[in-house]
Image (tube, rainbow, N blue to C red):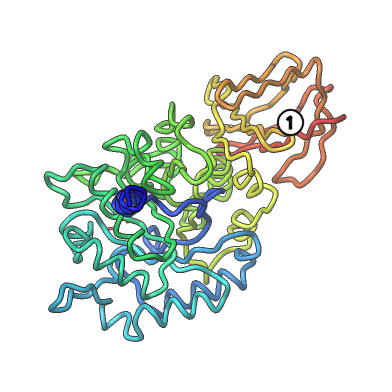
């Protein structure tokens, strides 16, 4: 009898304290989100067209899987408080849209917010968390981006915990993407709650500038990059830092898009494209689908890269990879090209966080340029080359026996 009571007590404790769905993001999530390009101009035709394009462009084959509708899909809540899609723009309903996306072998993502209203003023989750989670599960949602607007007096960790509990209770495994912008240091508490958390305010499609919107600012690529300082120790499989979605294909120069994409791969950042997939240039497709660069992002070790050195706007970033490999990325932030003459033997790499070290006097690596898709020789010779303005040279080092 006593054992039975003990078991019941344990069961009720376990069901009170649910957990996040484990193992849904062992590598950084890859997909597409409507916001950066389309903002509130979303409807079911755009989403279907985007799913088609994700397959036709080769992005699905390169590893992208989530199609996420950001803000503004919401209509009104019904009399019982259940959320409904906007009937004008989503007349077939969310279940039908999810079915369409799933039939393409892709996954379906949706957006809401912890506050009273979403950032664009639509009905949000506060007080409706369990109802919303039930609806998402019923519709076949696989990914939830949960924002942080209009959250007066809410505690961030508590609010995201409530939504985690609601998702768990609804029973459908859903990737939980916390969009708290870094204000409450989500990296310190987010790992047990969600699979990724935003580390900054919103990105903008500019390599090196800030856009001031009055009450808030959006940040260019290099600004967001600098805000990642110190955060790598918090990231790993199933819990990633999210420096915001990609702006590749949204108006920056090709070299800037390449640098942006490379750095997001070095950061083990989620790769969520934010451009119009049905209207991409050849260069945009080449950047978004470079499988060797993506492999650095998706590497199973799951360690976020770090800035090894920085001098006169030339940064060198390193990321440990599986099988004792490394990615090394030369980032030129200057607006003029740079010559490189890198003597590997003079640059031992040490990563205390990942417990990895390399001394090039003792070990030799094969070098591959991941954008030129060319083998460049070995680390026993000086790496001589050029890096264009606002561009990268991204190398993969593979140890030789
Ligand atoms: C916030 C988020 C963005 C986007 C918008 C939608 O600004 O940070 O990524 O979701 O809201 O309104």
Q: Quadrant of residue 168?
A: bottom left
Q: Secondary structure at mark 1?
A: strand
356 lies left or right of 129 = right
Residue shown at the point (29%, 59%) measured from the top left: 166
Mark 1 burial class by Cα count in 10 Å: few <14, some 14-19, many 20+: few
Q: Residue furthest front?
A: 1
State the image coordinates of residue 368 (x, y, percent, origin top left).
Answer: 77, 39
381 lies left or right of 321 = right
State the image coordinates of residue 170 (x, y, percent, origin top left).
Answer: 34, 65
145 lies left or right of 272 = left
Q: Nearer the viewer, residue 90 or 285?
A: 90
Q: Residue furthest bottom?
A: 92
Residue shown at the point (24%, 68%) measured from the top left: 131
User: Could you tell me if residue 178 is visible in this image?
Assistant: no
Question: Which residue does the numbered mark 1 point to in the structure image?
Answer: 385
Q: How many marks?
A: 1
Q: Nearer the viewer, residue 312 or 20?
A: 20
């Amino acid at each position: 009898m006593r054992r039975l009571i003990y078991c019941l007590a344990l069961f009720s404790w376990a069901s009170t304290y649910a957990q996040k769905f484990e193992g849904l993001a062992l590598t950084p999530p890859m997909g597409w989100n409507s916001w950066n390009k389309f903002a509130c101009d979303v409807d079911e035709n755009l989403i279907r067209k985007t799913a088609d394009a994700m397959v036709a462009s080769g992005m699905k084959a390169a590893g992208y899987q989530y199609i996420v509708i950001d803000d503004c899909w919401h209509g009104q809540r019904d009399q019982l408080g259940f959320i409904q899609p906007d009937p004008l723009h989503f007349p077939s309903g969310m279940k039908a849209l999810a079915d369409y996306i799933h039939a393409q072998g892709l996954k379906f993502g949706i957006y809401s917010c912890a506050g009273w209203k979403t950032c664009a003023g639509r009905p949000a989750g506060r007080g409706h968390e369990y109802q919303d989670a039930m609806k998402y599960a019923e519709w076949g949602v696989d990914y939830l981006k949960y924002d942080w607007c209009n959250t007066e007096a809410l505690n961030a960790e508590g609010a995201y915990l409530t939504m985690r509990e609601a998702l768990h209770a609804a029973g459908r495994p859903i990737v939980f993407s916390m969009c708290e912008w870094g204000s409450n240091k989500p990296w310190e508490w987010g790992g047990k709650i969600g699979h990724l958390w935003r580390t900054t305010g919103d990105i903008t499609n500019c390599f090196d500038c800030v856009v001031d919107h009055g009450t808030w600012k959006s940040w260019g690529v290099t600004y967001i990059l600098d805000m990642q300082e110190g955060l790598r120790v918090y990231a790993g499989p199933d819990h990633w830092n999210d420096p915001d979605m990609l702006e590749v294909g949204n108006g920056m120069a090709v070299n800037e898009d390449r640098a942006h994409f490379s750095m997001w791969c070095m950061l083990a950042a989620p790769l969520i494209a934010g451009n119009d997939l049905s209207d991409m240039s050849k260069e945009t497709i080449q950047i978004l689908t470079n499988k060797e660069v993506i492999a650095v992002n998706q590497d199973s070790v799951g360690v976020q890269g770090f800035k090894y050195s920085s001098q006169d706007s030339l940064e060198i970033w390193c990321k440990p990879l599986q099988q004792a490999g490394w990615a090394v990325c030369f980032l030129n932030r200057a607006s003029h090209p740079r010559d490189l003459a890198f003597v590997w033997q003079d640059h031992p790499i040490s990563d205390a966080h990942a417990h990895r070290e390399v001394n090039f006097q003792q070990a030799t690596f094969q070098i591959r340029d991941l954008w030129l898709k060319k083998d460049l020789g070995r680390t026993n010779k000086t790496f001589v080359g050029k890096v264009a303005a606002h561009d990268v040279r991204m190398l993969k080092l593979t140890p030789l026996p």
